[in-house]
Amino acid sequence: MMVKILLITYIFLFSDDKKYVYLTVDDGPSSITNQICDLLSKYNAKATFFVLGENVKRYPDMLKRIYLDGHLVASHTYSHINFCKLKNENKQLLVSEIKKTEVEIFKIINYKPSYLRYPYGCYSKKVINIAKELGYKVVNWDFGYDWHSYNEERIISEYLKNLKHKNIILVHDSPKRNKMVLRVIEEILKEGKRKNLNFIRLDESY
Ligand SMILES: [Zn+2]
């Protein structure tokens, strides 16, 4: 009996099926969100989209697509301000950046996000506490690289090296660099399959 329990525990803990990674997509929605969603469904992957309120307003249909495809919609605030560079008296601005984004998202998909990532990964105690008071869990990332101006091959190889069990990977929903971003995402998804990693939402784990 004991052996059987140990065996089941072993299979549960070490089976390849249980390996996962979190792909997080920041700054959208945008004109390329549809293509990102197509790639994710091609590889049967789920992701978390940290969207900007101002872009939700510009691309409401893209937000709908993210949501209907079963990805997690999360907040990246309204207009991408670096709150770590603001002074104390700007608490009001911060709250309104979060609230305005909530309103825009709710109008379209009737859903209030519960995960938030501040622009530039701002993670001071003050901003974290404000997000918590408003009901958010703040999540940054383990690896991101697509904002560097290195060539595509180098960017891809850095991503592939860092594609490991439980890592939170950051890419950008950025039409400015769309060809590169879409290729990076596809290579990440392919490599994930090769490594037997499941792509899951931040609110899931096994
Ligand atoms: Zn951002």
Image (cartoon, rainbow, N blue to C red):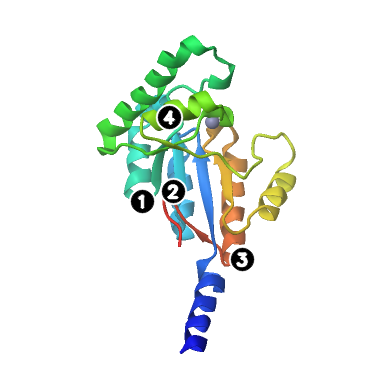
Q: Is residue 67 above or below residue 127?
A: below
What distance separates the C-alpha of mark 1 from that of mark 4? 27 Å
Q: Which residue is mark 4?
A: 131
What distance separates the C-alpha of mark 1 from that of mark 2? 8 Å
- Using residue 159 as the reference point, say whether residue 99 is left or right of it: left
Q: Badge 3: few (under 14), some or many (20 or more) residues near its Cα, within 10 Å?
A: some
Q: Secondary structure at mark 3?
A: loop
Residue 75 % position (x, y) = 42, 34
Q: Which residue is mark 1?
A: 69
Disc 1 marks which amino acid?
Asp
Task: Confirm or reject: label 2 Cβ below 8 Å from ligand 1.
Answer: no
Check whether the beta carbons of the residues at disc 1 and disc 4 lie within 8 A of each other.
no
What distance separates the C-alpha of mark 2 from that of mark 4? 28 Å
Q: Secondary structure at mark 4?
A: helix
Q: Which mark is residue 37?
A: 2
Residue 30 % position (x, y) = 45, 34
**Closer to the camera, 61 or 5?**
5
Q: Residue furthest top?
A: 89
Check whether the beta carbons of the residues at disc 4 and disc 3 lie within 8 A of each other.
no
Disc 3 marks which amino acid?
Lys
